[in-house]
Structure formats: structure tokens, C-alpha cells
Amino acid sequence: MSLSSPTAEAPSSASATDGSPAAAPAPGPPAGLTPMRLAWRRFRRDKAGVAAGSVVLLFFVAGLGAPLFAKLYGKDPYTTYGQNEPGLLNDYGYPIAPNGGISGEYWLGIEPGLGRDVLTQLLYGIRTSLLISLAVVAIVTVLGVVVGVTAGYLGGRTDYLAGRVIDVMLSFPSTLFFIAFTPVVTSLLTSPGEEMSPLLRGSILVMVLSAFGWAGVARLLRGQVLSLRSREFVEAARASGSPPHRIIFHELLPNLWTPILVTASLAVPAYVTTEAALSYLGVGMVEPTPDWGRMLLKGAEVYQTDITYMFVPGISMLIFVVAFNLLGDSIRDALDPKTDR
Amino acid sequence: MLRFLVRRLLGAALILFIVITATFFLFFAVPDDPARLSCGKTCTPDTLAAIRANLGLDQSVPAQYWDYLSGIFVGRDYGEMRCDAPCLGYSFVNSEPVLDTLLDRFPATLSLAFGASVIFLTVGIGVGVVAALNRGGWLDKTTMALSLIGASVTIQFLGVIARYVFVDELRWLPKPEYVPLLDDTPGWAGGLLLPWLTLAVVQAAVYTRLTRSSMVDSLQEDYVRTVRAKGLTPFQVTGKHAWRGAVTPVLTVYGIELGTLLGGAVVTETTFNIPGIGKLAVSSVANSDLPMIMGVVLIAAGAMVLANVVVDALYAVIDPRVRLS
């Protein structure tokens, strides 16, 4: 998804960028290429970026295609294989085979206790985490852009009010606030003692994370708009009688794609780890929903006897976050050739 | 300088007031039934009724807000229970004022934040400066790669693996636990060593990257070129001049970080079972203790605001341009 986004954006922003300075006759060759195409060219030449992008793509395919893989592999993340078949778990509930029970049958081993298959748990867990973080990033980005651009563009009292709301929002420590606010949102959406579906739990997580996540994006966008607003091309558009929506969508937004894309791409790994932290702390997803963070919680419980179960979610998450951060850096370099690392 | 400080403190007081108000409305006025959320895991109808009466939920929201606000300055009574000023609420689950529990837990959080800060600031800034001075070299590339990994690893994973390797298998480090500083100083440092190091690995990586990039910028400034041209040694250029320009962004980030840490390093405290503010937040959510949750949020937000004031004051000390503007 991330890899294809630069090309996917190309047609729309190409038409939108015409006339703004970003697309003004570029001094260097090759002439006639849209900025997004140029960025895509620069990105393709960046070996580390392409490698990181491939890893990220692999995680997306693995996570979103989890049901398909599970079918081919012949197992699901809920069946307690270890308890159903004798000879897999010992009397204490730990895998008998070495390294967490890794075998040709169970590629990443068996979960201690319940005896579920680790590989399908991981794939479905990646899916849960990715879906939640992508939803949060989408909501946070749209909200942040709307608030930030409105505040920056209108200025005056609106800007002052939005600025103060953002300040207060950002003065709450985020992780702590997510933990604290979860029961409040939960109480609003459920009646006491009611069993919550995984979908509802996931939605609550998305709401809590989004409720405060937009403020950072809004602050960034507001700053960008404030500096763009006084530039000549915006003043020219205003002087020539362009209506506000035209100024916002045709003059400002094309110049904001870079910061928006860069923050969004760096936000995905950040929310994956935050979601994992919340589930690890017991306020996110719970049994039996497969989840990356919940696997870490289980891993922390059994690590003394079965360290493999901790390594599987931990190492895979580390690889994912490193790759996504590298990808984010490469996206920034490709979109903004002036940055000097 | 004094005027600057007074102005900043007044601003902070205003923000704190807004934070208190926001906390009250988000946690108390938004839920349908705050009494139920304050009633603990095993909630009997009798307790619920008692809490409902004690919280004054039959009054209007502005009246409840006024009670809450005045409680902070003059204290208030919850039925027969007295909560002295500054009263941040009364925990019906623990049967004691929220502030007492918070003060009880704060030393653990402070110890964790203090020790980890010393390590990650020293390592992070030190390595960052060295990397910036060797920009483009192998040392720079290696540290940048390592810091990317460090910044990407999650504390719950790193902490557990480190504990397994260094405590259980190799027995190099003592078992992580919290002992009060005044009871047993070596035990305090020993028990917190692994939590400090774990937190420091993740944090130092952030500061290494930040210090390096701002140092690289600072080394290109005109005033640095001037002192270089004057013939100062590289050590003097860096140690006396360039760092002043580079340290402000580092301080900004540390200000936010310190505020967050004082509000409880939630994951670290949970992983190593340190009875601090962060662990209190998690357990009060699990125990359904709304007044305690609000208290933690208030303390954490207060720490954040105060840390920002301290950082602003430090700015003014380090960079004279801040004072003048």
C-alpha cells in the first residue's frame, strides 16, 4: 500500500499542482515529469528505501492475507492443538519439542498453555494491529489536516482557539491518557457487564487513539499553512478573486502533500507500537482475539520457560518498525530532495 | 530573568487550570455513571448508592465541578471521609484520598525517571556529538544504524529479553525490583539498574539521532565558522560554542519526555513490576477506580506542564537570544 501510494497519488496531485510553484518549470531535467513521478524516480534509486518498502509490503500481505495463508497452511489461530493432540505439550503445559515446539508441522511452534499455533496467531495478530493502526492514522490525518488547515487559513480567533485546544491536548501524556480514557469510552458504548465483541474493542481502541492523536498533525499542518499563506502565489490567487475552497484545494493542499505523507508514514509504526503497548497493559485487545501486543503479554508471562514465544512477536515487530521507519525516511527524501541527512 | 520566570509560571498555572477542567469534564461529566466507574471490580448496590451520595451526583454538573475545584484548594468531605486540601479526589476502592496513594507511588516513578535520564542523556548526547563530528564516516553510520534499531524496539520485548539474558541466565545483574532509596541505597540502585538500562536504550537512541542532526546544523552556523577561523581548537569549538546552538532542540524534547516519565513510564513499570504512577494507572483501570485514574492524569499533566516551565527557564540560561525575545 505504501509502496504504491506515490504512483497512486500521481494523477490527482499532478492536475492539482499545475500552476503552483511546486510544478513551476523545474530547473533540471527531465522536463515534463510531475513532482510525484520525480519523487517515485528518486525513491526507486534509493536501495535502502526499496528494501524497507518490500519488507513493509511483505508484512501487509502477510497480515491482510492471514486467512488465506491459514487456509493453505491448514491451521487457525483459535484451535488448541496442543491440548487436543497428546505429545505436543508436557504436564506443565509447555511445548515438548525444543525451541517452543517449532517443527515441520508447527512452523513457529506452539503456544504454551493453550497450545495454539504460533504462526497463525502471529499473522492474525499482525492483521489486527495493522487494521487498528491504519484506521487510526487515516482518522488522525484527516482530522488533523482539516483542523490544521482551517485554523491556519482562517487565522484570527479560530486559529487562537484551535491553537489553545491543541496545546491542552498535547499537555496530556499520551500513553497514560490512552489507558485512562479507555474505561470512559467503554462505559459510553456498553452497558455494565456486557460482553464486548472484538470489533467493538477494536473500535474503542481506534477512538481513544484518534481522540488525541489528531492534535500533533493539526499543529504541524497549521504551521505549514501559516507560512504558505503569506507566500506570493496564495496572495495572487486571493487578489484575483479565487474562492476559499479553490485556494485551499488548489493552492495550499498540493504543497502540503509532502508533510502529510511523511507524518502519516511515520505514524503507522508509532501506532502499531502504541496499540501493542495498550494490549500488553491489558487495556487493548483481549483473549481470544489474536493480537501482536497481546502475544507480547503472553510472552512476558512464559519467558522463563519458553523464550521462543517472546521472540516471535518481539522480533517480527522490531523488523516491521525498523523497516517502516526507514521507508518513512526514504519517502521524505524522495518527496523533498532538499533535505540533507 | 525573574520577569520571564513569573510570566512562564502564570502561563503554566493557567494551563493547569484548563487541564483540571478538561480532566473533570472528560472523566466525570462524559460517562453516564461515574459512580459505577468508581465502584471497583466487586461492586455491591450498597457501595454504589453510598458512592453516588458521596460524589454529589444528584447535583448539577456545574455544582459538581465547583465542588471538585474547591476541593483542590480547601479540601472536601466525602460523607464521613475527610479529604484534606489539595484534594484530588477520594478513592472508594482504596478508602483513602487519591493524593495519599499518588505520593506513596511517586518516589518509585521519580527514581526510575532520574536514573534513566542520567544514563540516556549522557549516552545519547555523547554519541550524537561524536557521530556529528564524524559525519559520513563509519562510526557515524554504525551509530545511526544502531540508534534506528534502538528507537524501534519495544520496551516490553527488550526488557523481558534483557531480564532473561542478564538476570536469569548470566546472573550479571540483580533481580529488578524497587527498594526505597533511604531504606537501602545499594539495593535501590541495583534493583533499578535493569529498568534504567532498558528505558535508556530506547531513549538514548532518540537523543543520539536528535543531537546528531542538530549538531550537524549547528556546526554549519556562521558563528561556529567564525570561532573556527579565529583558530580555536576543535574541542573548544564544540565544547564551548557549537553545543549551545545544538542543545535547545534536545532540551525541548527532554522537557516533554521528562513530563511523560514523571507521569509514569507505564510499560517499563509494568514489565519490571515497579510500583510507580504508571503501574497505578494500569491497576486503577483494571480495578475500576475512576477517582484514582483522574488523579493520575492530573499529576501526569501537572508534571508535564512544570517540566516545560523548567525547560523554558533552562533555555533562557543557555541561549541568551531566548531571554531577549
Image (cartoon, helix red, strand yellow):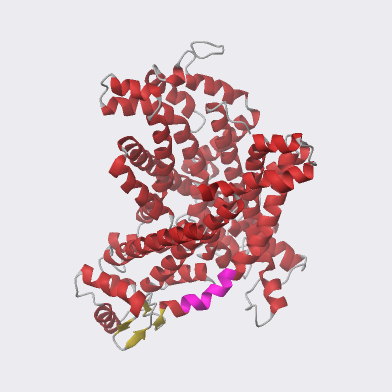
Query: Percent x, y for residue B205?
Result: 65, 50
Query: Percent x, y for residue B85?
Result: 38, 80
- For residue A312, above or below residue B299: above
> As rendered, which of A64 and A89 lies closer to the eye?
A64
Query: Percent x, y for residue B128?
Result: 69, 46
Q: Main secondary structure of the magenta part?
A: helix
Q: How many marks?
A: 0
- For residue A32, above or below residue B125: above
Q: Is A225 situated left or right of B131 in this image?
A: left
Question: Would you identify the image quadrant in which residue B215 lies?
Answer: top right
Question: Would you identify the image quadrant in which residue B116 lies?
Answer: bottom right
Q: Residues in magenta?
A: B101-110
Query: Percent x, y for residue A114?
Result: 53, 63
Residue ID at (40%, 26%): A231
Question: Would you identify the image quadrant in which residue A326 lies?
Answer: top right
- For residue A287, above or below residue B211: below
Residue ID at (67%, 75%): B188
> From this viewpoint, is residue A247 visible?
yes
> From this viewpoint, is residue B264 visible?
no
Q: Is B15 situated left or right of A265 in this image?
A: left
> As rendered, which of B277 and B8 lies closer to the eye?
B8
